[in-house]
Every structure is written in structure tokens, then in C-alpha cells.
Image (spheres, rainbow, N blue to C red):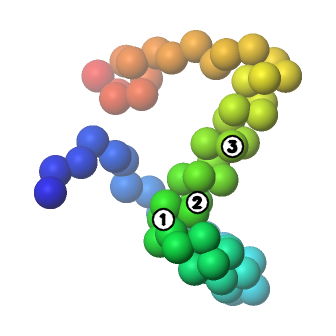
């Protein structure tokens, strides 16, 4: 299955990773889906306070 998502590596303290994993399980999400959900909420909250972040596709896709 093809995806347009960019793979990244994130480092966590073991305790934090464990707790996020437990939250993901309770929400019936994969760890990745839970992290995406949390990141999306963070962006939405930021933009509601500070305005929309403009997108620069040349930067996003490093053309």
C-alpha cells in the first residue's frame, strides 16, 4: 500500500512512550495513529491562537 506520509524517527523517554502506547491501545489506535492525532491537535490549537501556518510546498517536499 503506497502512502504519501514521510517517515521520521522520534526519541522518547521509555516511561512516556509506554504511557502514550497505553493511551493508543485504549483509543484503539496504533502508536503512530495516536501520535498523528496528538500532533494534529497541537497544530489546530496553535493555529486557532496564532492563525494558519502558511504552507510552502517547496519546503515541505524539498524540491
Say above or below: 38 vs 19: above
Q: Could you tell whether 42 is left or right of 59 in the image?
A: right
The residue at the point 27 percent across, 42 percent down is: 4
2 and 3 marks in contact (CB < 8 Å): no
Residue 17 visible in the shown view: no
Which residue has dot 1 on it?
A: 32
Say above or below: 13 vs 43: below
The tag earlier along the polypeptide, 2 or 3, is 2
**Mark 2 nearby-residue class (10 Å; few <14, some 14–19, many ≥20):** some
Q: Considering depth in this image, is 50 or 28 the residue closer to the camera?
A: 28
The residue at the point 66 percent across, 53 percent down is: 38
Task: Return the mark for residue 41.
Answer: 3
Q: Secondary structure at mark 1?
A: helix
Task: Return the mark for residue 9.
Answer: none
As measured in the structure, the alpha-carbon distance from the residue carrying label 1 to the one carrying label 2 is 5 Å
Q: Secondary structure at mark 3?
A: helix
Q: Considering depth in this image, is 7 or 32 the residue closer to the camera?
A: 32
The residue at the point 67 percent across, 75 percent down is: 23
Q: Quadrant of residue 13?
A: bottom right
Task: Return the mark for residue 35.
Answer: 2
1 and 2 marks in contact (CB < 8 Å): yes
Q: Considering depth in this image, is 34 or 17 the residue closer to the camera?
A: 34
As measured in the structure, the alpha-carbon distance from the residue carrying label 2 to the one carrying label 3 is 10 Å
Amino acid at each position: 500500500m503506497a502512502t504519501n506520509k514521510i517517515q521520521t524517527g522520534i526519541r522518547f523517554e521509555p516511561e512516556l512512550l509506554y504511557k502514550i502506547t497505553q493511551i493508543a491501545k485504549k483509543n484503539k489506535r496504533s502508536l503512530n495513529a495516536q501520535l498523528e492525532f496528538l500532533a494534529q491537535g497541537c497544530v489546530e490549537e496553535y493555529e486557532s491562537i496564532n492563525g494558519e501556518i502558511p504552507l510552502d510546498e517547496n519546503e515541505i517536499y524539498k524540491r
